[in-house]
């Protein structure tokens, strides 16, 4: 698979996940089935997943680690504010604690992606030893 195709597939996956998250967070409260997980756990998990997808797109486009972390935190934070402020238009309530949960999921995603990419970068840069 070419790098360009991989970038496009990740972008489509990320956009689809983000669109699905937007739809779910803007459904009227009575239309949402009751889930076993608490509201804040859902916020952390949801933002972790879309932040991971967003981070994967940035990685595929060669965005360096520090810049990637900053872009992810700023973008997801701004989206979280937009998400919370637009929910009342659909019969939901805005909650600043939800935003903190969103940011918790985002920061967790940044940490996971930074760790994974650091691990793989070290693995790739280390020459393999050939025993003769």
Image (cartoon, rainbow, N blue to C red):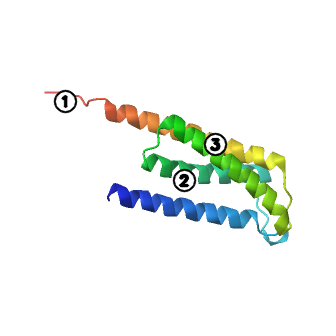
Mark 3 Cα-neighbour bin, 10 Å: few <14, some 14–19, many ≥20: some
Mark 3 → mark 2, Cα distance in angstroms: 13 Å
Tell me residue 27's x, y (percent): 77, 69
* Residue under the image location 42 percent in, 45 percent down: 62
Q: Is residue 24 above or below residue 120?
A: below
Mark 1 Cα-neighbour bin, 10 Å: few <14, some 14–19, many ≥20: few
Tell me residue 106's x, y (percent): 64, 44
Residues tagged 3 and 1 counted as in contact (Cβ below 8 A): no
Task: Say which element carries label 1.
Answer: loop
Mark 3 → mark 1, Cα distance in angstroms: 42 Å
Q: Quadrant of residue 9?
A: bottom left
Q: Which mark is residue 130?
A: 1
Task: Say which element carries label 3.
Answer: helix
Q: Which of marks 3 and 2 is in front?
A: 3
Number of marks in the rendered image? 3
Q: Name the residue under label 2.
A: 53
Q: Which of marks 3 and 1 is in front?
A: 3
Residues tagged 3 and 2 counted as in contact (Cβ below 8 A): no
Which residue is at the front of the view, 80 or 124? 80
Q: Is residue 49 above or below residue 8?
A: above
Q: Earlier in the sequence, mark 3 or mark 2?
A: 2
Q: On the rendered image, what quadrant is the C terminus found in?
A: top left
Mark 2 Cα-neighbour bin, 10 Å: few <14, some 14–19, many ≥20: many
Q: Name the residue under label 3.
A: 73
Q: Which of marks 3 and 1 is nearer the N terminus?
A: 3
Q: Earlier in the sequence, mark 2 or mark 1?
A: 2
* Residue under the image location 26 percent in, 29 percent down: 127
Question: Could you tell whether 104 is left or right of 110 in the image?
Answer: right
**Which residue occupies the extreme bottom position in the image?**
31
Task: Say which element carries label 2.
Answer: helix
Q: On the rendered image, what quadrant is the N terminus found in?
A: bottom left
């Amino acid at each position: 698979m070419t790098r360009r195709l991989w970038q496009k597939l990740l972008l489509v996956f990320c956009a689809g996940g983000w669109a699905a998250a937007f739809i779910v967070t803007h459904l009227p409260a009575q239309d949402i089935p009751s889930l076993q997980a608490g509201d804040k756990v859902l916020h952390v998990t949801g933002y972790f997943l879309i932040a991971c997808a967003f981070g994967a797109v940035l990685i595929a486009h060669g965005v360096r680690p520090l810049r990637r972390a900053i872009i992810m935190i700023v973008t997801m934070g701004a989206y979280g504010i937009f998400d919370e402020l637009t929910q009342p238009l659909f019969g939901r309530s805005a909650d600043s604690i939800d935003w903190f949960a969103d940011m918790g999921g985002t920061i967790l995603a940044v940490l996971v992606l930074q760790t994974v990419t650091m691990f793989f970068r070290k693995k790739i840069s280390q020459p393999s030893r050939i025993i003769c």
